[in-house]
Amino acid sequence: MADLMKFVKDELVVRKDFPVFGAGDTITVYYEIKEGEKTRTQFFKGVVIQRRGSANTETFTIRKMSGAVGVERIFPVNLPALQKVEINKKGAVRRARIFYFRELTGKKAKIKDKRR
């Protein structure tokens, strides 16, 4: 049974090639929205707070400020509506999950750029 599950995960699920990103990076996610019979592309730009899961069940959470309100969105990596992911900035953080970022405001909410 385990071999059958592994086969389904490896062969039948479409793998998308996204760039490597992690917590602290600022990314833009382009995804498709269906409204009736029409489809359009919308984007969501923000800071990656976490990546969790593995293989087909992997998800990542993005947070952005919309006015004075923080908005978070969780995207599954294998979502068929995902079109592309662009990395805008690499951030230097010390943790894999930066939940402390939710409470920060003003200059403290700025993430340093990663030196190459």
Image (cartoon, helix red, strand yellow):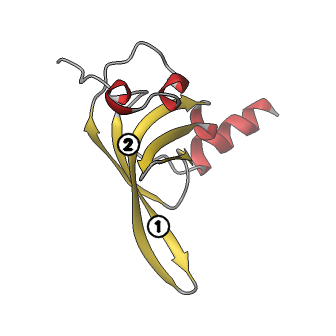
The quadrant holding residue 55 is: top right
The answer to whether 37 is drawn above or below residue 77 in the figure is below
- Measured in 3D between alpha carbons, the distance from the residue under mark 1 to the one under mark 2, in whole angstroms, is 16 Å
Identified at 38% across, 42% down, the residue is: 18
Residue 37 versus residue 8: which sits nearer the camera?
37
Amino acid type shown at disc 2: Phe
Q: Secondary structure at mark 2?
A: loop
Q: Looking at the image, which residue sits at the far right?
A: 1
- Taking the spot 42% from the left edge, 75% from the top edge, the residue there is 40
Q: Which mark is residue 41?
A: none
Disc nearer the start of the sequence (1/2) = 2
Q: Which residue is mark 2?
A: 18
Most distant residue in the bottom direction = 37
The reply to whether residue 19 is in sight is no
Residue 48, horizontal then vertical, whole percent: 44, 35
- Quadrant in which the C terminus appears: top left
Q: Give the percent coordinates (x, y) of residue 50.
A: 52, 30
From the top left corner, tell me how far across and down residue 106 is, in percent. 35, 32
Decide: is 44 above or below 72: below
Is 25 rendered above or below residue 84?
above
Q: Is residue 2 left or right of residue 78?
A: right
Q: Quadrant of the N terminus?
A: top right
Q: Nearer the viewer, residue 63 or 4?
A: 63
Q: In the rendered image, which quarter is residue 4 located in?
A: top right
Residue closest to the eye, 102 or 4: 102
- Circle 1: element type: strand
Q: Residue at x 45, y 48 (%)?
A: 68
Q: Nearer the viewer, mark 1 or mark 2?
A: 1
Farthest residue, direction left: 116
Q: Amino acid at mark 1?
A: Glu
Residue 32's label in the rendered image is 1
